[in-house]
Amino acid sequence: MYEDIFAEVQLTVVEQPIEWVEELPLYRGHLKELPFITGEGSSKKAMYRQLAEQYQEYAALNQVEDKEEEMTSSLLTADQLLKYYDGETFDGFSLGDLLKDE
């Protein structure tokens, strides 16, 4: 049931053996693909809730970073490239190739 939530986003929950602390169960686990996302709780449900909350925070942060990367890696015109690189050429770039496309 809880595993289905993470299976939808292709993540695997690794559950640790149940520990007993002061005669109460302690469930612990982490995401196999993102081991820094961990959860624990007095029930399996509480552990999965914590994992889900941490994953949501992680996904939200990475979505912002992905948008920034998209903006900086968008295609530039030949003039923009020359201005950015101060007229220098770099590996795999030929001004002749750009001028042919225009």
Image (cartoon, rainbow, N blue to C red):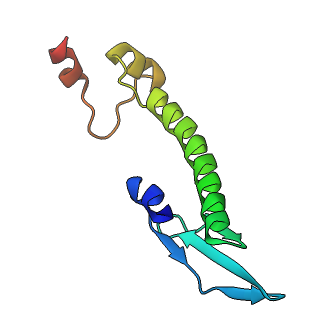
- The residue furthest left is 100
Q: In this figure, what is the number of numbered marks? A: 0
x, y (%) of residue 95? Answer: 25, 23
Above or below 69: residue 14:
below
x, y (%) of residue 99? Answer: 21, 15
x, y (%) of residue 76? Answer: 37, 21
Q: Nearer the viewer, residue 75 or 65?
A: 65
Measuring 47% from the left and 56% from the top, which residue is drawn there?
5
Query: Which image quadrant: the C terminus?
Result: top left
Measuring 26% from the left and 38% from the top, which residue is drawn there?
92
| 41 horizontally vs 75: left or right | right
Q: Nearer the viewer, residue 1 or 76?
A: 1
Measuring 55% from the left and 46% from the top, which residue is drawn there?
59
Residue 27 visible within the image:
yes
| 47 horizontally vs 88: left or right | right
| Rendering quarter of residue 24 | bottom right
Above or below 94: residue 79:
above
- The residue furthest right is 22
| Rendering quarter of residue 45 | bottom right
Measuring 60% from the left and 63% from the top, which residue is drawn there?
48
Above or below 101: residue 23:
below
| 25 horizontally vs 67: left or right | right
Residue 38 visible within the image:
no
Above or below 3: residue 77:
above
x, y (%) of residue 54? Answer: 64, 55
- The residue furthest top is 102
